[in-house]
Every structure is written in structure tokens, then in C-alpha cells.
Image (spheres, rainbow, N blue to C red):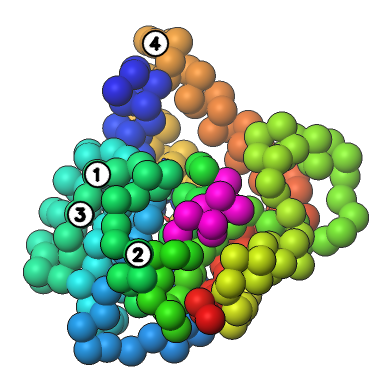
Amino acid sequence: MDEYFKELVALHRPNRRQGPGSREVTLQALELTGVKGPGLKVADIGCGTGASALILAEHLDAEVLAIDLFEEFLDELKIRATDSGLGSKIATKVASMEALDLEPESLDLIWSEGAIYSMGFEAGVAAWTPLLKSGGVLAVSELTWLSAERPDELTEHWKKEYPEVGLASAKLAILEKYGLSPMGYLVLPKSSWIENYYEPLMARLDEFERGCSPVIDTIIAEIEQEIALYERFANYFSYGFYVARRT
Ligand code: SAH
């Protein structure tokens, strides 16, 4: 792993979550899925240290396969699962979300919070939908414009960082294009970004020494810029949570 990712993983590992979200939103989205056991097969893709995988294991009669690119996150997830008595319900797999070696039509539920952007929403939906059983459900959070009009500066920023950022209507159309029937849409509230993600991340940044390594300084600068952007423009974008069933 190159130094940039090594430091990024070290920075994020101790925190409860590696992206915006909340227990309440995860449970609301889970309610919208309507999935019920027994014996559900669930995958959490880009699970990080398990913010959502642990909740899914707690609330479902299921085997949860927690998938991430970084083994260090999965090691942390295993510790948390054991500590919460959920170790027997969660298996982990180091893999890229772009090359998931899973059986077609094998899953009742695919979960993914704050991660699909890494391969792009449309490519992710196209690649993952065939893994769902007929009637299986996809629940995924994705960067979403909250209004059709917004400051040009913000549009330019996200066009550069994540060109697929779009309105919920465009995301719903993509779900439909790949044979999914939308069942629900939620917007992550500001507390999911600030209290649950940025504040713990800033507290963690204080433990990293500035000026020791250019890589660490780059990471800190990127995070500070991201937070400043969110604080200025929080009314215009958030993560949307999309729940859709394979027809
Ligand atoms: N779902 C977690 C983590 C979100 S951060 C949470 O909500 O807290 C995004 C996660 O996606 C990170 O854990 C990162 O390691 C993982 N990730 C990034 N690119 C990936 C890829 N190509 N394949 C699998 N996981 C990836």
C-alpha cells in the first residue's frame, strides 16, 4: 500500500465511521428495505470498520459479508464484532468492489454507505444488481444534489472531484435502467456529516503531527478543505440513501 493510503487508513481506523451517516439513518433505510429473515445473505460493500455492518448483523437474522479494500479496516471490524457479540454473524472479505467474486443471484440485500463513488454510482449499480436474488434489495448512499440550482463554485468543485454527482431524480433513473424498482429515498441530515463524521475526524487530525511528512500534510489539507466546503454549501448537497428492489 502506498504511503498516502497507509496514513489515510491509520487516520480513519479508530473512528466509528469513515463517512457521513448515522445509526438512525441506517435503521430507517433498513426499515424501507422490508427484508426479513431467517437466513438472509447480506453484503456490505466498502464497509470500513463496520458502522453499518454491525447494525445489520444486530438487527437481521443474516450472515453479513463485510467487504473492503483495506484489511486494516476489516481487522478493526472483527474486533468490534467480537466485542459486541456479533462475531458469528459477520464474515469479512478483502476485495475491490469493482471485482467482486460473488455468485450471481446469491444475495437478499446489498448495503453500501459512502463508498460506491469509488467506482461510480452507475458502474456500481450495473455490477452489483446481478448479485441480488430476484426480489433482493440494494440500499446505497450516494452524493446527491439537493436542488437543481446551486452556486457555480460548488458545481465546478464536484464536477472535478466526482463527476457523477447528480440529482436524486437522475439516480433513481439509473436504478430503474438496471432493473431495480425504487422503494425509498432518504437524505442524510447535517448531523450525519458534522457530529458523526467531521467532528471525530477533526479530533483525530489533532493527534497527527503536522509538518512531519508531506503526505500527512496533504491529507490534513484535503480534509480541511472538504469540511470548509461542506460548511459553506451544506444546503445544496448531501448523501442520498437509495433503496431499490430487483424486479
Ligand atoms: N461504509 C463505511 C465506510 C465509508 S468510507 C462507513 O460508512 O463508515 C469508503 C470505504 O470504501 C472505505 O472503507 C474504503 O476503504 C472503501 N473502498 C474504497 N474503494 C474501494 C474499492 N475499490 N473496493 C472496496 N472498498 C473500497
Q: Give the spatial CA distance, label 2 vs label 3.
A: 19 Å
Amino acid type of the residue that numbered disc 3 sits on in the rendered structure = Thr
Going from N to C along the chain, the mark reached first, 2 or 1, is 1
Give how far apart the Cα atoms at labels 4 and 3 are: 32 Å
Q: Which residues are magenta?
A: 120-128
- Closer to the chain start, of discs 2 and 3, is 3
Q: On the picture, is 95 further left or further right than 244?
A: left
- The amino acid at mark 1 is Val
- Kindly identify which residue carries mark 2: 104
Callout 1 environment at 10 Å: few (<14), some (14 to 19), or many (20+)?
Answer: some
Q: Answer yes or no: do the residues labelled 2 and 3 have beta carbons within 8 Å? A: no
Looking at the picture, tell me which residue is in the foreground, 199 or 15.
15
Badge 2 marks a residue whose secondary structure is loop
User: In the image, which is nearer the foreground, mark 2 or mark 1?
Assistant: 2
Q: Which class describes the residues within 10 Å of circle 3: few (<14), some (14-19), or many (20+)?
A: some
User: Could you tell me which residue is drawn at 15 percent across and 54 percent down?
Assistant: 78
Assess mark 2: CB under 8 A from ligand 1? no
In the rendered structure, which disc, 4 or 2, sits on the residue that comes first in sequence? 2
Secondary structure under tag 4 reads loop
> Which x, y percent locates residue 188?
59, 65
Q: Are marks 1 and 3 in contact (CB under 8 Å)?
A: yes
Q: Which residue is mark 1?
A: 94
For the point 26% across and 80% down, which residue is it?
Answer: 40
Q: Amino acid at mark 4?
A: Ser
Mark 2 is surrounded, within 10 Å at the Cα level, by few (under 14), some (14 to 19) or many (20 or more) other residues, namely few
Image disc number at residue 213: 4
Q: Earlier in the sequence, mark 1 or mark 4?
A: 1
In reply to whether residue 146 is colored magenta, the answer given is: no
Instruction: Bin the neighbour count of mark 4 within 10 Å (Cα to Cα): few under 14, some 14-19, many 20 and up.
Output: few
- In the figure, 212 relative to 107: above or below? above
Q: Is residue 35 visible?
A: yes
Residue labelled 3 has its Cβ within 8 Å of some atom of ligand 1: no
